[in-house]
Structures are given as C-alpha cells and as structure tokens.
Image (cartoon, rainbow, N blue to C red):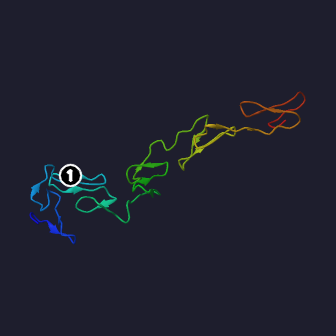
C-alpha cells in the first residue's frame, strides 16, 4: 500500500481519506470523503457532526449530544429542547416561550394557561362543556351560564 495506506486482514489496502485505488496510488479529487453529515475541511480532513467521529465520520459517538437547560438527546443525536429554549444544545432562551390562542396566556414555565372554555397545548381546543349551570341555566359560547328568569349568579 502506498501513501500511508495500511494492509487490512483481508489483504486489501485501507487508504487514508485523500487517496484511493487498490494500492492507495490515486489522489482523491475531492480532498476528503466524509460520511454521516461530515464536511471536508480546508486541511483535507473531515469535520464531523457531534454524534460521529473517525477520519471519515464513520464511527458513532457513545454520547451523541450534550443538551443544556433540561434538553434531552434524541435518537438522531440532536437535542430536544423544552419550549422555553432553542439552539443545537438548548442554550438559547426563546424570547416568546409559547404561543397561546383564544385568550390564553404564556406562563413562566413556557406553557399556555388557558381560559376555562379552552384546552390544549396552545388553548386551541374548545372544551365541550366549559361551564356548569344549575336551575335550567345553559352554558353560552363565551363559557358563562345563561340563567332562566328568576335565577342569577355565575352558575344560576
């Protein structure tokens, strides 16, 4: 084997990234071949994403990612961030931690606080029975009881 190649147990040459051919005699036109999302650097060596290592980014790293602020490492090696953080490692606070509809408000934990007549992560789902009314009162579309004559109060 030429150009720093090594003879493998099968008798074939294992070439460095910048050479190819049966005996590592041919320079690679592209300075390096990188796998798993790696990029070829100006020095002809692979720059690997955090979840891979090796001369051609061919070896998975045991701990594929490091996540901050309560983020968790996903099966693809990328951080899954809580709603109030973003970035490759959950290092950046989100300026508006949540988007809430139908009058919901964003709480300090980054989750929506919904009015009684709505539910869901963004207060997007109407509650089927948003209010409890007595004495024949009916629940109105605004989530408030409509009382029959002679009855008053929030629940008639």
Could you tell me which residue is drawn at 69 percent across and 37 percent down? 117
35 vs 151, left or right, is left
30 vs 143, left or right, is left
Q: Nearer the viewer, residue 149 or 70?
A: 70
x, y percentage for residue 12? 18, 66
Could you tell me which residue is drawn at 28 percent across and 54 percent down? 35
17 vs 143, left or right, is left
Could you tell me which residue is drawn at 71 percent across and 31 percent down? 142
- The residue wearing badge 1 is 40
Q: Tell me the element at label 1.
A: strand
Q: Nearer the viewer, residue 78 or 55?
A: 55
x, y percentage for residue 18? 14, 56
x, y percentage for residue 130? 73, 38
- Considering every residue shown, the one lying at the far top of the view is 149
Residue 20, located in which quarter of the rendered image? Answer: bottom left
Q: Is residue 137 above or below residue 120?
A: above
Could you tell me which residue is drawn at 38 percent across and 60 percent down? 66
The quarter of the picture where the N terminus appears is bottom left
């Amino acid at each position: 084997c030429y150009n720093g190649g090594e003879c493998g147990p099968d008798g074939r040459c294992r070439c460095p990234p910048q050479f190819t051919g049966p005996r590592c005699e041919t320079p690679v036109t592209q300075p390096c071949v990188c796998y798993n999302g790696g990029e070829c650097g100006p020095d002809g060596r692979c720059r690997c994403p955090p979840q891979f290592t090796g001369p051609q980014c061919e070896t998975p790293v045991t701990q594929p990612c490091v996540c901050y602020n309560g983020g968790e490492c996903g099966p693809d090696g990328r951080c899954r961030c809580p709603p109030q953080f973003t970035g490759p490692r959950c290092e950046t606070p989100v300026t508006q931690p949540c988007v809430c509809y139908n009058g919901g408000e964003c709480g300090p934990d980054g989750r929506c606080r919904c009015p009684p007549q709505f539910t869901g992560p963004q207060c997007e789902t109407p509650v089927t029975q948003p209010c409890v009314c007595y004495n024949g009162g009916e629940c109105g579309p605004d989530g408030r009881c409509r009382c029959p004559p002679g009855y008053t109060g929030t629940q008639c």
